[in-house]
Amino acid sequence: MMLPSCLIIISTIMQNKVILVTGANGQLGNEMRQVSQKSQKTYLFTDVAELDITDKQAVSRFVKENGVTTIVNCAAYTQVDKAEEDEKNAWLLNCSATNNLAEAAKEQKALLIHISTDYVFSGNKCTPYVEEDLPNPYSIYGKTKLAGEEMIQKSGCHYMIFRTSWLYSEYGNNFVKTMLRLTKEKELLNVVFDQVGTPTYAADLAKLIFDILEKNEWKEEQEGIYHFSNEGVCSWYDFAKTIAAFAGHSNCKILPCDSSQFPSKVKRPNFSVLDKRKVRNTFDWDIPYWQEALVRCLERLSVLCK
């Protein structure tokens, strides 16, 4: 098969390891590009222009003809509010396309690493969610992501599912970049304080996935669901205050407010802190504190006030 000219391939040395990264133009996909640059394995980065993962035959053919040994699925329908009105496409990308990847992985005896979300939970707990907690999503986004998880588990493929929360990076649109813009432009800003969770720097999640792939030590007993975010706990208000302080945007006054002041069709989890003990213990991985991770992101964005 001739690979598309726009398909980025990291490394020309196969070493019997071919890793397909879908959703490569998103936050996590771009971070995977960065961490994989020094790898001796072959990374194939695709987005919809190179591979439409909603096309079952195209996925199966691509995985087989390129000898893919691992699929890292970073593709998702992530527009939480829009999903309430655009259910068809949310189900297509978060569930059907995920199933296509799972079935292709099973056919090729490949490992599927899939990214899921804290939105699979209701947010009604007051202690961190562990992997065994019963999911109960309220939103279409959460329901479609949970269905994608279930499709993977039923497929019979080898898999790891990483649920994450409050993802941000220097790529694309996210809370950090929005707050950097607003706190620079505005004198007053209201940010909700009754939704609590933990931010996740996409670079840290990408580094974890990369380290797992590079060690060549994946075992079947490691198969399953994992929770990953940075360490610590904060509200969106705390997060916004810290972003502004680290960026030196002291002219903007940030006030805490109730989420009812921002009416939405989506009921967002009030508490979505994820327990990371399983991922720490399984992979012997130190997870950075959320403020430390934020500093690294702001340094890369060249906006950190020193």
Image (cartoon, rainbow, N blue to C red):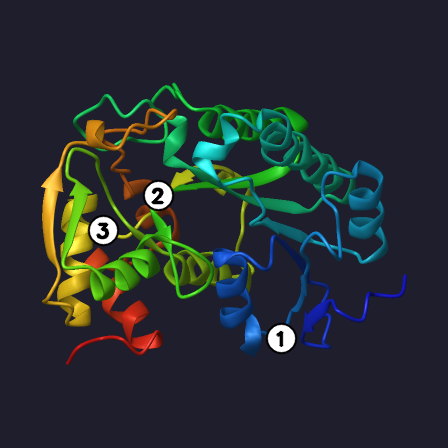
What amino acid type is highlighted by mark number 3? Glu
Judged left or right of residue 195, residue 223 is right
What amino acid type is highlighted by mark number 1? Gln
The number of callouts visible is: 3
Q: Which residue is mark 2?
A: 165
Label 1: element kind: loop
Q: Which residue is mark 3?
A: 231
Residue 53 picture location, percent across and down: 72, 43
Q: Residue at x 57, y 40 (%)?
A: 159
Q: Residue at x 13, y 61 (%)?
A: 252
Q: Residue at x 73, y 77 (%)?
A: 12
Q: Residue at x 10, y 42 (%)?
A: 256
* First along the sequence among labels 3 and 1: 1
Label 2: element kind: loop
Rate crowding at label 2 as few (under 14), some (14 to 19) or many (20 or more) other CA atoms within 10 Å.
Answer: many
Judged left or right of residue 235, residue 114 is right
The C terminus: image quadrant: bottom left
Determine the CA span between mark 3 and mark 1.
31 Å
Q: Quadrant of residue 89?
A: top right
Q: Which residue is mark 1?
A: 40
